[in-house]
Amino acid sequence: MISGAGDCAAGAVGNGIVTKGVLSTSLGTSGVVFVHSDEVKIDPEGRVHTFCHAVRGKWHMMGVNLSAGGSLQWFRNALCQAVVAEAKKKKVDVYTLLTAEAEAVAAGSSGLFFLPYLSGERTPHADPDARGCFIGLTLSHQRGHLIRSILEGVTYSMRESLAIFEGLGVPMKQIRASGGGARSALWRQIQADAFGRKVVTINSEEGAAYGVALLAAVGAGEYKNIAEACGATIRVVSEISPNRAAKKVYDATFPVYQQLYRSLKGDFKTIAGLG
């Protein structure tokens, strides 16, 4: 018998998130924090989701940010046409140029915050009225600050999911970065610094497609179970450790990020009612 899976569960199999303590962060248009669980664990506040895993008898939990890489894509499309043209001329990825500007900016973006609620938000707020914001802008901020604040804002959002998992007692021994955003060494470093944990990458980039191929291989008898299939085919190829100084900055700024939503929640609803 060959089992099926939803997109996130299949992607988790493709990333080897099939054993206790292994977690993935996926940065595509949306951002997903996905963790395997041997037991059913449900957030009573409904901030994260619990589902059956593609692994028989196991479960998974996930938190979702609706505009992760989508926030950076919006910024590129709306405000960076000159950089897009430069990238085409140089025959390089435009995101390489944008993240190079962000890399020149120190952790914390000089007090600039970005709330990545361009499509409302799912985790942890479940608020369709939430709106994206740059908060803390001054005359000293340059484009690099805006870019870095987007990377940081999305990462803060993912850290909120990690905090919920920790509060529920879900073990997290390894974080595997995946998705298009994981190709950025800077964004992986920001994750390691903001999470205060090592972040690794693996040899597979196919995600869900690779996951369903492994499920099919198990169903065809190539491997006795999914954990064996992942163990035989997936390996860690890089590792980034937290920078202590940057971690200290993010530990101080993360509570500010969290408070901004609470402060603006009522205003978001008012703004949503205007248009």
Image: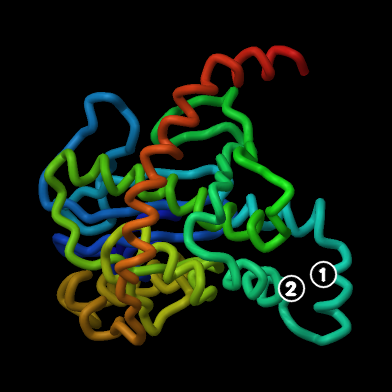
For the point 36% across and 39% down, which residue is it?
A: 255
For the point 69% across and 12% down, which residue is it?
A: 273
Marker disc for residue 94 = 2
Q: Position of residue 142 (x, y in %)?
A: 72, 58
Q: Is residue 172 left or right of residue 253?
A: left
Q: Is residue 204 left or right of residue 236?
A: right
Image quadrant for the N terminus? bottom left
Nearer to us in this view, 133 or 47: 133
Q: Secondary structure at mark 1?
A: helix
Which three-letter amino acid code belongs to the residue tagged 1? Val
Tell me: residue 162, above or below residue 244.
above
Q: Position of residue 5 (x, y in %)?
A: 37, 55
Q: Is residue 53 left or right of residue 117?
A: left
Tell me: residue 216, above or below residue 76.
below
Nearer to us in this view, 7 or 134: 134
Marker disc for residue 83 = 1
Q: Closer to the observer: label 1 or label 2?
A: 1
For the point 69% across and 69% down, which residue is it?
A: 98
Q: CA distance from mark 1 to mark 2?
A: 7 Å
Q: Residues within 10 Å of mark 2 (few under 14, many from 20)?
A: some
Marker disc for residue 52 = none
Q: Are marks 1 and 2 in contact (CB under 8 Å)?
A: yes
Image quadrant for the C terminus? top right
Tell me: residue 77, above or below residue 46.
below
Q: Residues within 10 Å of mark 1 (few under 14, many from 20)?
A: some
Taking the image as drawn, is residue 5 in sight? no
Nearer to us in this view, 62 or 113: 113
Nearer to us in this view, 202 or 183: 183
